[in-house]
Image: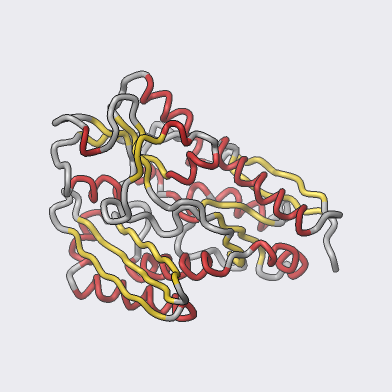
Amino acid sequence: MTKRHIVIATRESPLALYQAESVKAWLTAAHPSLSVELLGITTEADRCLDITLNAIGGKGLFVKELEEALYDGRADIAVHSMKDVPMTLPAGLCLPVIGEREDPRDAFVSNRYESIGHLPMGASIGTSSLRRQTQLKSERPDIAYQPMRGNIHTRLGRLDQGEVDALILAGAGLKRMKLTSRIRSYLSIETSLPAAGQGALGIECRENDHATLAMIAPLNDLKTQLCVLAERAVCRQLGGNCQVPVAAYAEIHHGILSLRALVASFDGKRILRARLSGAPEKAEQMGIYVADHLLEQGAMKILKEFL
């Protein structure tokens, strides 16, 4: 049966709403007679902005209430930033569609300084990401890393009020919100390896909703999907989530998938790295292999610092 109406569950942050609107536009372009409605939901993670994600259960709280809307039939699909999606999905739900990836790099945002290298000794950076903190500490252990949550505009406001000297934010979010003028420079992949799925949007739905599965299928970008599959396989094999500093990033060029990943200690003094290139159709197996290589180097001993 062909659907005529689809409800999209989305967080109510400005960025999440923009991303859901993008998916709505993609859907209506693919199916001109389709009507699409957004169901805005304020998640627990959005309500508890004065508490670190680690303390309240991790980034999974960004998607939990959206998944409940799928379960009870209030929504047909949910749109997520893939870096926020737990590595294991609840029973009965699937992520069949990953949209084309935006820039995956981290961005340096400051009103006074051009890059991390230009920050003076003892300067402060706002970021709640252990992945970012640990990698940057290896180059700038003198910097004070201040936990900072909230939507993009909230964090930019705190920067503008002088609470910190700089922010590290996902470049993709700033681009989507038309805030590229705030980006002073990008962190190279070598300096700050991205989180698994960073820059990509995922569409989640019920496994048995075949009509919806058929309608959203044209929105999938296979290259991005395979890259994200490899990255998430690394994290899943390591037991990784936002509470541990694991990074994984894959690219496909000339028919070859190149995957790199790392695990970092809290002080940034020890960073384990692994990489592998191979056939894109072996994405998941490659992710598992890279994770196992990190484990052979002693990754679990490092990860236990954070568990």
What residue is at 40 percent from the left and 49 percent from the top? 58
Front residue of 14/183: it is 183
Q: Compared to 101, does 2 lie above or below?
A: below
The location of residue 216, given as percent across then percent down, is 70, 62
Residue 250: quadrant of the picture: bottom left
Q: How many discs mark residues in the rendered view?
A: 0
What residue is at 74 percent from the left and 50 percent from the top? 7
Residue 56: quadrant of the picture: top left
Quadrant containing the C terminus is bottom left
In this view of the protein, can residue 93 be seen by the observer? no
What residue is at 41 percent from the left and 59 percent from the top? 196
Front residue of 254/90: it is 254
Which colour style is shown? secondary structure
Q: Residue lying furthest top in this view?
A: 161
What residue is at 42 percent from the left and 31 percent from the top? 182
Quadrant containing the N terminus is bottom right
The location of residue 104, given as percent across then percent down, is 43, 53
Front residue of 253/226: it is 253
The location of residue 248, given as percent across then percent down, is 35, 62
Q: Compared to 96, does 159 lie above or below?
A: above
In this view of the protein, can residue 245 be seen by the observer? yes
The location of residue 117, given as percent across then percent down, is 21, 38
